[in-house]
Image (tube, helix red, strand yellow):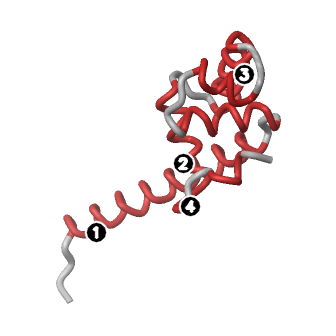
Amino acid sequence: MVWNEREHVVGIEQNLAATVHGEESRDRIAAIEQLTPTQRKVLRGVHLGLLNKQIAHDLGIAEATVKAHMTALMRKLNVHNRTQAAMAAQTFGGEQGIGASLTH
């Protein structure tokens, strides 16, 4: 077998990327598990593409309360916008999406 430095470097990079992604996923899951039940419901609404007004109506709370929950959950998840929050929710739910995972 001939040593191929390029293939070796690419393999190391791929393994590192998988490790980093896995660590980020574990951190994100741990953060989501720290959300309150209402924050999880708000996050589910964001993941479904609902507006704050729609989430507020569905949960029977004020839109300002949804905004407060968004601020808190984005801080806990260490994300900066709704899209990143929705992606974090997808990380938590895996292939099945967030479904019931975030409704408890």
Q: CA distance from mark 2 to mark 1?
A: 32 Å
Q: Is residue 60 toward the left or the right of residue 27 in the image?
A: right
Mark 4 highlights which residue?
Answer: 96
The amino acid type of the residue labelled 2 equals Gln
Mark 3 highlights which residue?
Answer: 69
Residue 100 sits above or below residue 39 on the image: below
Q: CA distance from mark 3 to mark 2?
A: 18 Å
Mark 2 highlights which residue?
Answer: 90
Residue pictured at 74% horizontal, 29% vertical? 59
Mark 1 highlights which residue?
Answer: 8
Residue pictured at 35% horizontal, 57% vertical? 13
* Residue 75 % position (x, y): 67, 23
- Nearer to the camera, 5 or 58: 58
The amino acid type of the residue labelled 4 equals Gln
Q: Earlier in the sequence, mark 3 or mark 4?
A: 3
Q: CA distance from mark 3 to mark 4?
A: 24 Å
Q: Earlier in the sequence, mark 4 or mark 2?
A: 2
